[in-house]
């Protein structure tokens, strides 16, 4: 029945014209994993198996082998509660601190960092393996000096194919106090190559990366300015694995709090974000929390997923257009195609409370200034105009992939006693939506459109930075 409705609406959508609004992904309200996993001690650095049935983390629970040990909690199905955590034992854990586990997609390799004696600095990266999920973990192996440095190397995150390992390190050659690095290998039988610094770092402190299962989104913690607390979670994305990483975006106040929110981990299906936090409502020092990751399917924000949203998607079919790129993962895959249509169809005719986007207002006194926007915000530009003279404002410079104009300009005539008073004067009001991170020049000119080669009477120009 749903397929029939989807096809019917698709046919209808082909004949419609719709204005496009911002589509991205958002988050559900974070929830604490509860007292079975979290205690009055410190639970941190979650890593979820590809099946979603095993959760690895480190904790200072009593009964361990060192300062901090690695534990695992399991559940029968993804709808069940987490069971009592089990210590990975003395083969994996040592008398030192063993933290930040990262489980491979096949659950046969577990990467982590440890302060036990190694080859590098205060902490090294290690890996333990097993022949099958029914076998015990083997003796951990140090990743060696090609990967490890004389600095602290920590928080590994292994890619689904096992060929890329992201981690944090303050080693020389970085951009900040601590950077994210990545080492790669041609196959799982080859040695790891020399780590490189990807384009997600800042002059601040970045660590604890989590590479998504599709390799197109990199979540990480950062202490850069402009956040919400003492450490926030950010994400950078790319269209393909061969593309450079895009501008890092703060996950916002739905996930980040005024406390420390660190060490993100994304489920293999992209539906859940796990992280550690000191926010109120927990059981101890650091607790593990989770939040759902939800694609924004109401593309025009009118409160319902219907033919208008389908039309918006069809309008940009085959394009790398972030507004409609919502599948198969919430952050998309670099192209608007059937994967996005499937996600949209799953929510067809669902109703969503309309969300009024935040507006940022500018006028002629802001000419020449720089304006910062968050993705999803509306920029309202109000400029004096008198159409009876033939002069109108026209947009002549802008990057629509970053800042998209919302419909035609609106003319608001001045009321008696308000300037300007000449003729039928008033204001032209332009609205733009910040749809993707980046920087663009927005320039408008006040001229008579039919007068070619004539200098405009006025110009208005601002630099717009979208975070």
Image: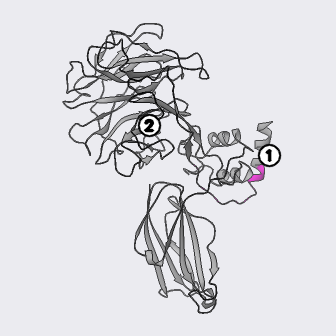
Can you give x and y, in whole percent of width and height, for residue 163 in the image?
A: 39, 28
Residue located 55% across and 31% down the image: 269
**The quadrant where residue 22 appears:** bottom right
For the residue pair 439 and 70, the one nearer the viewer reads as 70
Q: Which residues are magenta?
A: 11-23
Label 1 – label 2 distance at C-alpha: 47 Å
Q: Quarter of the image for the C terminus: give it.
A: bottom left
Label of residue 52 in the image: none
Query: Left or right: where does residue 270 sit relative to residue 305?
Result: left
Q: Secondary structure at mark 1?
A: helix
Residue identified by numbered label 2? 279
Residue located 49% across and 41% down the image: 255
Label of residue 8 in the image: 1
Render colour scheme: one colour
Query: Left or right: where does residue 209 sit relative to residue 2?
Result: left
Mark 1 or mark 2: whose residue is earlier in sequence = 1
For the residue pair 387 and 85, the one nearer the viewer reads as 85
Queried whether the magenta region covers residue 222, the answer comes back as no
For the residue pair 376 and 196, the one nearer the viewer reads as 376
- Can I make out residue 213 in this image? no
The local crowd at label 2, few if under 14, some if 14 to 19, many if 20 or more residues have their Cα within 10 Å, is many
Q: Secondary structure at mark 2?
A: loop
């Amino acid at each position: 029945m749903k397929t029939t409705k989807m096809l019917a609406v698709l046919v209808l959508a082909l004949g419609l014209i719709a204005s496009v609004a911002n589509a991205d992904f958002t988050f559900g309200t974070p929830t604490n994993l509860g007292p079975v996993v979290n205690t009055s001690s410190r639970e941190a650095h979650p890593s979820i198996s590809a099946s979603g049935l095993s959760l690895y983390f480190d904790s200072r629970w009593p009964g361990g082998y060192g300062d901090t040990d690695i534990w695992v909690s399991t559940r029968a199905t993804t709808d069940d509660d987490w069971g009592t955590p089990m210590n990975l034992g003395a083969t994996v854990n040592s008398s030192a601190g063993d933290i930040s586990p990262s489980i491979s997609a096949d659950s046969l390799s577990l990467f982590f960092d440890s302060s036990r004696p190694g080859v590098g600095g205060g902490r090294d990266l290690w890996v333990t393996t097993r022949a099958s999920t029914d076998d015990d973990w083997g003796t951990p192996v140090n990743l060696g000096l090609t990967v490890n440095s004389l600095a602290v190397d920590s928080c590994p995150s292994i890619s689904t194919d096992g060929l890329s390992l992201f981690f944090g390190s303050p080693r020389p050659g970085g951009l900040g106090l601590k950077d994210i690095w990545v080492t790669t290998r041609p196959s799982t039988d080859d040695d790891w190559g020399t780590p490189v610094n990807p384009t997600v770092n800042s002059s601040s402190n970045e660590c604890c990366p989590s590479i998504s299962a599709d390799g197109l989104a990199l979540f990480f913690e950062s202490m850069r300015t402009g956040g919400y607390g003492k450490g926030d979670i950010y994400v950078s994305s790319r269209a393909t694995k061969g593309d450079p990483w895009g501008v890092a975006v703060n996950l916002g106040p739905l996930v980040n709090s005024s406390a420390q929110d660190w060490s993100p981990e994304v489920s293999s299906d992209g539906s859940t974000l796990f992280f550690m936090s000191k926010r109120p409502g927990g059981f101890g020092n650091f607790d593990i929390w989770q939040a759902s990751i939800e694609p924004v399917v109401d593309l025009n924000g009118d409160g319902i997923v219907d033919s208008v949203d389908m039309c918006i998607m069809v309008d940009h079919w085959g394009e790398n257009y972030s507004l409609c790129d919502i599948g198969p993962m919430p952050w998309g895959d670099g192209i608007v195609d059937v994967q996005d249509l499937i996600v949209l169809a799953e929510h067809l005719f669902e109703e969503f409370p309309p969300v009024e986007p935040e507006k940022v207002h500018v006028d002629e006194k802001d000419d020449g200034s720089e304006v910062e926007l968050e993705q999803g915000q509306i920029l309202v530009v109000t400029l004096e105009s008198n159409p009876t003279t033939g002069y109108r404002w026209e947009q002549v410079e802008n990057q629509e992939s970053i800042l998209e104009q919302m419909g035609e300009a609106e003319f608001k005539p001045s009321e008696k006693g308000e300037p300007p008073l000449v003729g039928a004067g008033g204001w032209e009001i332009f609205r733009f939506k910040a749809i993707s991170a980046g920087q663009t020049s927005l320039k408008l000119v006040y001229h008579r459109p039919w007068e070619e080669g004539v200098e405009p009477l006025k110009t208005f120009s601002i630099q717009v930075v979208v975070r």
